[in-house]
Every structure is written in structure tokens, then in C-alpha cells.
């Protein structure tokens, strides 16, 4: 996988850091810029994990940025802000589902973190392949192709080694390639 | 980018909901309040949307000074059950701990929390 | 509310049970063993505890309460745990008289096929809470009871 196309990442990363620093120093407009920059990302993540539920996505959006406002003094940003917002949004989806479903009788663990779901337009031809992958691979694919994160950022968002992200992505793509060649 | 990646990029494209202007304004306003120090670092904070997004700005105006809790995502444990059983749980935790869904925290919730704590239902590890 | 993440030091005691088998047939005879769940809180009163235990090579067949009055009733557990080797236990005391120090808070009954040798319980997900519901660090272990048969 070629990451050269992500040359712009460093600039944005610095900028996220600079904005976060400015926000900590009392610059409210810096928060606005961070919000506008990462709003779409948080919505995508919430939609992906929340079953394309618009209302849930909006709830998660506001709570994710409320978290950011509250926790900004403690945050250490090593990559783009999205790598920090990703696990927060995912946990918030889970919390909303717990609240909504209360104590379901099924076998699912209400405390378990949700798995990503492909978007409605994903297509039946690829859906089986996606659902046959492990949850970590599914997350990696979402971060890579829906959110366009680099491997380093994916690793940071998922708190896994870069090598793991790379190999899981490679394996998933190989499986898909083989599937398409046989069809 | 090869064809496969192009294909996946196209398939993963997802329509996101349009963010109502008042919610945008409320969140940005929250940032300004926080930057001005009105949302203190240790103060718990939560924005509350009730039903319609249209209500968000008004609710946020009431709540962004830190009157409601946004709990850290955390699995329920026996200490939660104990606080609920003793009536010592923070009212701001109601959303998280009210497993019976009746809007209050009582012994029945403590009981449910304990049930959940000891449940052997598989937890999915990453 | 001030909440402390629990960092519990876990220790699993190596368990040696019974006398060596006298003949090959006895090697695979079912045996019952009793394990004590022990919490050492030091000077802090214990209001609640939970613990996940896996005892490989054994089947859990029973759970009973502990020694202190506050934890005399059997702790909460998932009934599906019986006839398996993994169980999550949790108990809380809402009275004012809370015990402290080294406490046997529960007892587990297990069966082995007689060839299991030393059982090594694996402990995880331990939580202990004090009289204000705050999590605190305590020492937990699961050890062979003097009442093993």
C-alpha cells in the first residue's frame, strides 16, 4: 500500500496540534476549527458503528466534542485528532445502544463494543466478504477506505502495532482479490 | 491507488446526516465556553439532546456549564452496583446505571447491574 | 464522585490436593475440591468485590458464601458457570458493619477427574470497593481450602 499520497497528513497533524494548543490557551475559535475539520469523520464513525442511525450519529457527534472540550487539557496528540476521537465515538455508540436497549435478552453482550457495519450502498457482492472478516479487519477497512487514514493513524486509533494494521489490511484485500478473480 | 482500493473507497462512501445549524452552533459555543474557562477541567459535562435536534441549543444553554455527567466509557462493575444499592450514585449517572429504564436508580437497578457483572456472555476481544 | 481505577494485585496459589493416587484406577476417579476466595483489604472496610476465576482442569459445581457476616450469603454468579471452568463472582454489603483484613469471602466447589494434578486458578477482572463505593487496591487469591476432600 502506498502512503505517499498522504503527504498532507503531517501538515494537518501539526495543525491539529496547534489548534488544540490554542484551544487550551483560551482560543475558542480553535475549537470551532477542530470541530469543523473532524465533524464529518465523527459522523461517519457513528454511522458505521451505529447502524446508519442518523439521530444516534448526531448524539454521538455532540458528545464526542463535549468530551474533547472537557478533556483537552489532558490530551497528548501524536497524530491527527481523529485518532483520538475514533475510540471515543465508538464507545459512545456502545453507550447509546446500552441505554436504548437496556438489558436485552439475547446472547449479545450489552457492554461489548459494536462492530462496524458496511453502509447501505455497500453491495451484496462484497457484503459476505466483509462480514466474514474479523472485527479488527473490519475496523481497519473502515478507517482506511471510508475515513482515509494512513496505516500509522489506523494503528494509533486502534492502539495496535502498525505491522498488525498493515498485515490485516493486506490479508483482507488479498481475500477480496481472490474472491473477485473467482467470480 | 489500484482498482480494488478505488472500488472499496466507493463502496464505503456513506451518507452522513446533515448537522442542524443549531447543533453546530451549540457545539461551537461549547468550545468557546470551555476556552473561556467556564467549563472547568474537572467538571463533568454533557450536552443533552432531547428528541428533536431543534431543542438542542436551548438544552445546551442550560447544560453546558457542567450540570450533567458524561461518563468515561467503562464497563459496569460491582462498585457501581453498590453505589446504586446504597442510593449514593450520582444522579448524573442515571442514564448509564438505570438498567430497568424507569428513570430512577434503585435496588432493582443494582440487581440488574450485578446480573450483568457476573454474566458469562462472551465479550468480544479485539 | 471520586473514582479510582482498581489496580488489584492478583495472586493465584498453586494448589496441591489430596494424597497421591494409590493405584491407576484411582488416578481418574472424580474428586471434589474446595477453593477459598480470599481478599486482603488491609485496614480498609470491604463493601463490595468481584472476581473472575478460571480453574482449568476442573468443573465448577458449587458456590457458597464467605466467613464475615456481611458476605455470608453466596455471591452472585451466572448459573451457566456451573459445569464450566470459568465463573464471575460478585457480592456487595449494604450494612454498616463491614469487615476488613484478610477475609474469606466465598468458597468454590469443583470436581476434577483425578488426573488434574495441581490446579492453577487464573484470576482477572477483580474489583474491590470501600465503604464509600470507591474502588481500591486489594490483594485477592484463590487457594485450596483446608476443607478439601
Image: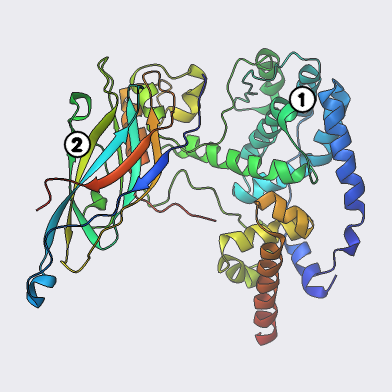
The chosen color scheme is rainbow
In x, y percent, where is residue C68? 20, 27
Q: Chain of mark 1?
A: B
Disc number for residue B56: none
The mark closer to the camera, 1 or 2, is 2
The residue where tag 1 is placed is: B22
* Location of residue C98 by image quarter: top left
Residue B105 relative to residue A93: left or right: left
In x, y percent, where is residue C117? 22, 64
User: Is residue C50 in sight in this rendering?
Assistant: yes
In x, y percent, where is residue B23? 74, 27
Q: Nearer the viewer, residue B66 or C12?
A: C12
Q: Nearer the viewer, residue C4 or A140?
A: C4
Q: Residues within 10 Å of mark 2 (few under 14, many from 20)?
A: some
In x, y percent, where is residue A152? 77, 56
Q: Residue at x 63, y 37 (%)?
A: A55
Residues indicated by labels 1 and 2 sit on the same polypeptide chain: no
* Location of residue A15 by image quarter: top right
User: Is residue A103 in sight in this rendering?
Assistant: no
Task: Tell me the element at label 2.
Answer: loop
Residue C63 relative to residue B101: left or right: left
Task: Tell me the element at label 1.
Answer: helix
Please tell me how many numbered marks the rendered image carries. Answer: 2
Tell whether label 2 touches label 1 (CB within 8 Å). Answer: no
* Location of residue B103 by image quarter: top left
- Determine whether A175 is above or below A114 in the image: below
- Determine whether C52 is above or below A31 in the image: below
The residue where tag 2 is placed is: C74
Q: Residue at x 66, y 17 (%)?
A: B59
Amino acid at each position: 500500500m502506498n502512503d505517499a499520497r498522504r503527504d498532507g497528513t503531517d501538515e494537518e497533524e501539526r495543525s491539529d496540534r496547534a489548534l488544540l494548543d490554542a484551544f487550551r490557551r483560551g482560543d475558542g475559535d480553535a475549537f470551532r476549527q477542530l470541530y469543523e475539520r473532524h465533524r464529518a469523520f465523527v459522523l461517519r464513525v457513528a454511522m458505521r458503528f451505529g447502524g446508519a442511525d442518523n439521530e444516534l450519529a448526531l448524539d454521538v457527534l455532540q458528545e464526542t466534542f463535549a468530551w474533547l472540550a472537557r478533556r483537552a487539557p489532558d490530551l497528548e496528540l501524536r497524530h491527527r485528532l481523529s485518532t483520538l476521537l475514533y475510540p471515543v465515538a465508538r464507545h459512545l455508540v456502545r453507550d447509546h445502544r446500552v441505554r436504548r436497549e437496556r438489558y436485552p435478552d439475547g446472547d449479545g453482550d450489552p457492554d461489548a463494543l459494536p462492530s462496524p457495519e458496511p453502509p447501505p450502498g455497500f453491495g451484496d457482492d462484497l457484503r459476505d466478504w466483509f462480514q466474514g472478516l474479523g472485527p479488527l479487519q473490519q475496523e481497519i477497512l473502515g478507517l482506511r477506505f471510508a475515513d482515509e487514514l494512513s496505516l500509522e493513524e489506523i494503528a494509533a486509533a486502534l492502539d495496535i502495532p502498525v505491522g498488525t494494521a498493515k498485515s490485516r489490511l493486506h490479508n483482507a484485500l488479498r481475500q477480496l482479490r481472490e474472491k473477485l478473480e473467482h467470480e | 491507488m489500484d482498482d480494488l482500493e478505488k472500488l472499496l473507497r466507493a463502496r464505503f462512501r456513506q451518507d452522513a446526516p446533515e448537522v442542524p445549524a443549531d447543533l453546530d452552533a451549540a457545539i461551537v459555543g461549547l468550545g468557546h465556553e470551555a476556552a473561556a474557562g467556564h467549563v472547568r477541567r474537572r467538571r463533568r459535562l454533557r450536552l443533552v439532546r432531547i428528541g428533536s435536534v431543534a431543542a438542542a441549543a436551548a438544552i445546551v444553554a442550560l447544560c453546558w456549564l457542567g450540570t450533567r455527567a458524561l461518563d468515561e466509557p467503562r464497563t459496569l462493575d460491582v462498585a457501581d452496583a453498590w453505589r446504586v444499592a446504597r442510593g449514593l450514585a450520582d444522579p448524573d449517572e442515571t442514564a448509564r446505571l438505570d438498567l430497568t429504564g424507569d428513570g430512577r436508580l434503585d435496588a432493582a437497578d443494582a440487581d440488574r447491574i450485578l446480573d450483568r457483572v457476573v454474566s458469562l456472555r462472551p465479550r468480544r476481544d479485539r | 464522585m471520586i473514582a479510582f481505577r482498581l489496580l488489584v494485585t492478583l495472586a493465584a496459589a498453586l494448589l496441591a490436593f489430596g494424597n497421591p493416587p494409590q493405584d491407576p484406577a484411582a488416578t481418574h476417579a472424580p474428586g471434589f475440591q474446595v477453593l477459598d476466595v480470599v481478599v486482603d483489604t488491609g485496614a480498609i472496610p470491604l463493601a463490595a468485590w468481584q472476581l473472575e476465576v478460571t480453574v482449568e482442569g476442573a468443573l465448577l459445581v458449587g458456590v457458597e458464601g464467605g466467613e464475615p457476616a456481611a458476605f455470608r450469603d453466596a455471591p452472585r454468579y451466572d448459573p451457566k458457570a456451573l459445569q464450566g471452568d470459568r465463573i464471575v463472582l460478585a457480592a456487595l454489603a449494604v450494612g454498616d458493619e463491614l469487615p476488613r483484613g484478610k477475609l474469606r469471602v466465598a468458597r468454590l466447589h469443583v470436581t476434577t477427574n483425578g488426573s488434574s494434578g495441581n490446579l492453577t486458578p487464573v484470576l482477572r477482572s477483580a474489583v474491590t470497593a470501600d465503604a464509600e463505593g470507591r474502588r481500591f487496591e486489594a490483594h485477592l487469591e484463590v487457594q485450596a481450602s483446608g476443607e478439601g476432600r
